[in-house]
Image: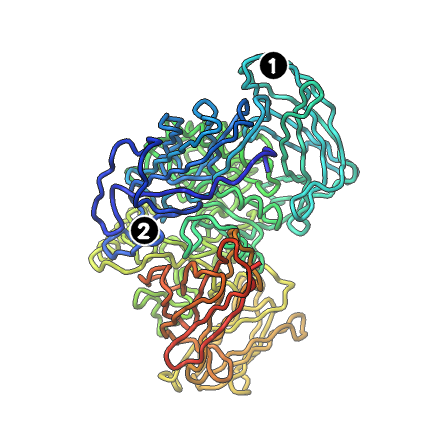
Amino acid sequence: MGASNTVSFDQGWSFARYGLQPDGTRRAEPTGLEAPALEEDGWQKLNLPHDWAITGPFRIELDGSTGKLPWKGIGWYRKHFTPSKADAGKQIFVDFDGAMANAKIWLNGKYVGTWPYGYTSFRMDLTPFLEFGKENVLAVRLDTETWDSRWYPGAGIYRHVWLVKTDPVHVGHWGTYITTPEVSDQKAVINIEATVNNQSKKSTKAIVRTTLFELDASDKPARKVATAQDIKIEMNAGENKVTASKASILKPKRWSIEKPHRYVAQTSILINGKVVDTYFTPFGVRTIEFTANKGFLLNGKRVQIQGTCNHHDLGALGAAFNLSALTRQLKLLKEMGCNSLRTSHNPPAPELLEMADKMGFLVWDEAFDAWKKGKRKNDYNKIFEEWHDKDLTALIHRDRNHPSVFIWSIGNEVMEQQDVKLTKHLADIMRREDPTRPVSNGYNDPDGGRNSGAVVGLDLMGVNYFFSQQGKWDADPRYANKPTLGSETSSCVSSRGEYYFGGTEYKNWQITSYDVASPGWGCSPDEQFRTNAKYPNLLGEYVWTGFDYLGEPTPYNSDETNLLNFRTDAGKKEELEKQLEAIRKNNPPSRSSYFGIIDLAGFPKDRFYSYQAHWRPDFPMAHILPHWNWPERIDSITPVHVYTSGDEAELFLNGKSLGRKVKEPGKDFRLVWDKVSYKPGELKVLSYKNGKLWATDVVRTTGEMSKLALSTDRPAIQSGKEDLCFITVKVMDKAGLMVPRSNPTIHFSIEGPGEIVATDNGDATSFVSFQSQDRPAFNGMALVIVKAKKGAKGMITVKAESNGLTTGISKIQAQ
């Protein structure tokens, strides 16, 4: 929420791209692009958030690790606005939630400031440069040519921008800090710190008053629950003061995963009895405890971390933030049983934390992918010395009031994992700004980090993949009391709807969906579940990854940073170097990852049901794989796997039992019938729990493609907002069954007050532009994303057409 007088600054920008162009040519960057009088002929008119690279085109010669998209370039954004004369005397700020990368800002041709790290939110004070009652020009220059990444970072002002107006005496940027040092069923003691800035030219006396309310589902203050004592302050001109007050909430409603209750603190600044500034801070009442043996305790009860790692891109939308898209992702993860998110490997959009607060997700909030020593030439290492303290402070001050945030992370797989001094230095910065949460680090060299003693400087040990020595470290006196968590696990890879037989896992730049393939450092989900069962003291895991993401298409990836996972294993490193060289020669078309449990279009892969079965043991479910359309495999062995939350199951082919199988606890996380001889017809599983029928699933051999069927994730969307409708398209036979091996080209069209934003199908090798209205289905499915036109209302009709198939139609109401 923040300052009460905050308005969106997303509308009405102009954009031009210089330097490297989408086709690989160069366009010279003129001087003076910040000048107010500059003619903007030919500049693109747009609204933010904006990712200048997602429109492509995909180019085979570009780096697969960053999505084969032309994201490197120099982008200029300009916005004309006229501040009211009535605002003269106010402080005017512009807040950027994120700008990729190396942002430099001018107002009316005068330099305001810079913020290089594209993931951190930041504020610029416009007040000294504003001309009230006149047209002002804000200019922003971004440069990704001098930025490097190991995945697709996006490019541009890709998160929201806000204009903030305050009195010269006001609560500072992210200026409140709320903690709950004492929590019981009877009472919660609330500590409230508020930083007050006096940016006026005279000394002043003020009162700081904070009132606490319950926060309702629409983010509005509801019932008043407490009022803190007033704090009187005297401030000199230009002075900042930190105030401290307390309040108590009787019979507090605790924030939890199941019931994410929230409160809001309303902090007001009064001068001569008049309220001159109001600041709102949502927060939650909860206790967290991390133990080496009892696990993680939320409100005194153990919670096993069932988490996923996720990059920040939103598939076909690129890095440009959209709340509808994020909400869709979080709902899918919740359905799977996920209860925690790791923001790999950077500060997230602020809305992710807001949604996590509301939906009941725990968040591992991460800062960096590199420290002083880079993984790429121009990654964070170039700005580390000057900016690491500022970036860590910004991250913590922005995020420390969110009840969902329960772990801080100083980095991921950094080159200095064994650096005792630097590890402690970074952890101490985080503790300086917030001592209420543990500090961790993601180690892909956990043995080296522990041997060196670097881990001693952390509160929580994060292990990426390499658990073979876990028993040894649990017994080491230095780490016997160190809580440990799987900060990255599994790294299983698969392509939705692709199944290979006879031991084949990789073919045609795709990967089998039997959920058995992984790079050398990874393992199947089953193997990780066994590891977690072997070491019950582990707090849980973060799977790499919840969703496929743009870039890093391992194993079809020539990225040398894969070698970092074997920095202490010379044999493995040499083996992988040979594989990478072979991949480089083949120049693979892969442009997005295969790690996701859910594909890039948001369609669950088979693995989704493996995690759902394990993470939601009380949810009746069963899932059969593969599909049952194999005309070329009549009488050939076609293994059948079943994921179920039951403890045993019986499989039937055309009504004939193929046997009943029982899970061995801690060992079996799927049931396998590996000698099934393929015959067309019906494959059915009956799952049992405690001897009683629990769940069923059926797959059938389908007929020929006949029609397209559309289904929407919502019946209506709001016009003039960032509301999106995600429409799933399935290729069906006459009986209404999805035809799994069908890939017809589908043409999308729209009538009424709507626009097609993007299309996708989850195919990691597709070079079709996300903006194309012609999209091949991939294994029977495709996606079209629609928005309402600004200010328009009425019925939107979306059509999906393909030669020889009955047209699919979907209707959405624009409100």
Query: Mark 1 highlights which residue?
Result: 235
What residue appears at the point 54 percent right and 78 percent down from the top-left corner? 698
Q: Quick one: quadrant of the N terminus? A: top right
Q: Label 2 near label 1: C-beta < 8 Å?
A: no
Whether residue 633 is visible here, answered yes or no, is: yes
Left or right of 566, for residue 700: right
Q: Which residue is mark 2?
A: 65
Closest to the observer, 423 or 746: 746
Is disc 2 placed on a helix, strand or loop? helix
Check disc 2: other Cα within 10 Å, few if <14, some if 14-19, many if 20+: many
Horizontally, residue 577 falls left or right of residue 769, namely: left
Give the Cα separation between the discs numbered 1 and 2.
52 Å
Label number found at residue 705: none
Q: Is residue 121 above or below residue 648?
A: above
Residue 197, percent from left and from top: 57, 21
Given the image, on which type of amino acid does mark 2 rest?
A: Ser
Is label 1 in a helix, a strand or a loop? strand
Mark closer to the chain start, 1 or 2: 2
Q: Position of residue 139 (x, y in %)?
A: 37, 34
Asked if residue 711 is positioned above or below residue 11 in the image, the reply reads below
User: In the image, what residue type sits under mark 1?
Assistant: Met
Res 4 → quadrant: top right
Is residue 300 shown to the viewer in this render? no
Q: Which of 71/86 is in front?
A: 86
- Give how far across and how far down residue 300 sits, in percent: 69, 43
Q: Mark 1 Cα within 10 Å, few/some/many (few <14, many 20+)?
A: some
Name the residue nearer the viewer: 657 or 220.
220
x then y, percent, for residue 80 = 42, 36
Question: Which quadrant of the rendered structure holds the C terminus?
Answer: bottom right
Q: Nearer the viewer, residue 22 or 201?
A: 201
